[in-house]
Amino acid sequence: MKLSHRKGHILLETNNIDNIKEFLNTLGKKLVAFSPGKIEIMSEVNENLKTNIDQISHDFIIEKLNLLSRLPVISEEDPVSISKPRPNKYWIIDPIDGTRSLVNGYQTYVCQVALIEDAIPIMSVVYEPALNNFYHSIKGQGSYKNDQKLNSNLQKLPNSIIDNYPEPISSIKNLIKTTSISKY
């Protein structure tokens, strides 16, 4: 899907999802190949790690999004962007959701990019590099995994937590203990 400008607006066109997938695939290959010995933990707050690869991934995604549009980017890796008032239209990214999983050798981490307009996500792409799965969604057009449309199942699920770590860590363990969540 290509994003193009017209009278200050971005229009979603079909080849720009492909552009985002392409640069996330490139990033994913770098992440999968990243040597564990080169991962530097920069900070750890509660259970959230910040590493050099978070910053590398952030910089890479920002560079590529700036080639698509000049919209502002809000990123988990940029506290200043998070604290500013939200514009009408912007990108929001989480360069690596599941850094601890990546650092510990688990395959359940993702790279995420979404386009927000009027506080509503209108397009998103999530890439799972270690498993080579792409998920994307376009407002009004549904959600897809590896370009296959996903069927929404409105069936009630048990109270569950879906996480990117193979077993609950302390904050999730506490949540499970204090709620009616029955499945991890």
Image: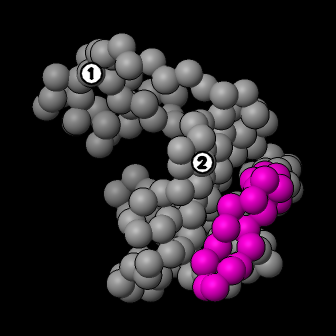
Q: Quadrant of residue 12?
A: bottom right
The scheme the figure's colours follow is one colour
Residue identified by numbered label 2: 138
Residue 33: % across, % down: 85, 49
**Contact between labelled residues 2 and 1, with CB atoms less than 8 Å apart:** no
Residue identified by numbered label 1: 159
Q: Is residue 157 magenta?
A: no
Q: Nearer the viewer, residue 60 or 67?
A: 67
Classify mark 1: residues with Cα within 10 Å, few (<14), some (14-19) or many (20+).
few
Residue 105: % across, % down: 67, 39
* Residue drawn at the location 57% of the way across and 63% of the way down: 115
Q: Secondary structure at mark 1?
A: loop
Which portion, as a residue range, is magenta?
A: 1-21
Q: Secondary structure at mark 2?
A: strand
Question: At label 1, which amino acid type do we have?
Answer: Asn
Q: Nearer the viewer, residue 157 or 47?
A: 157
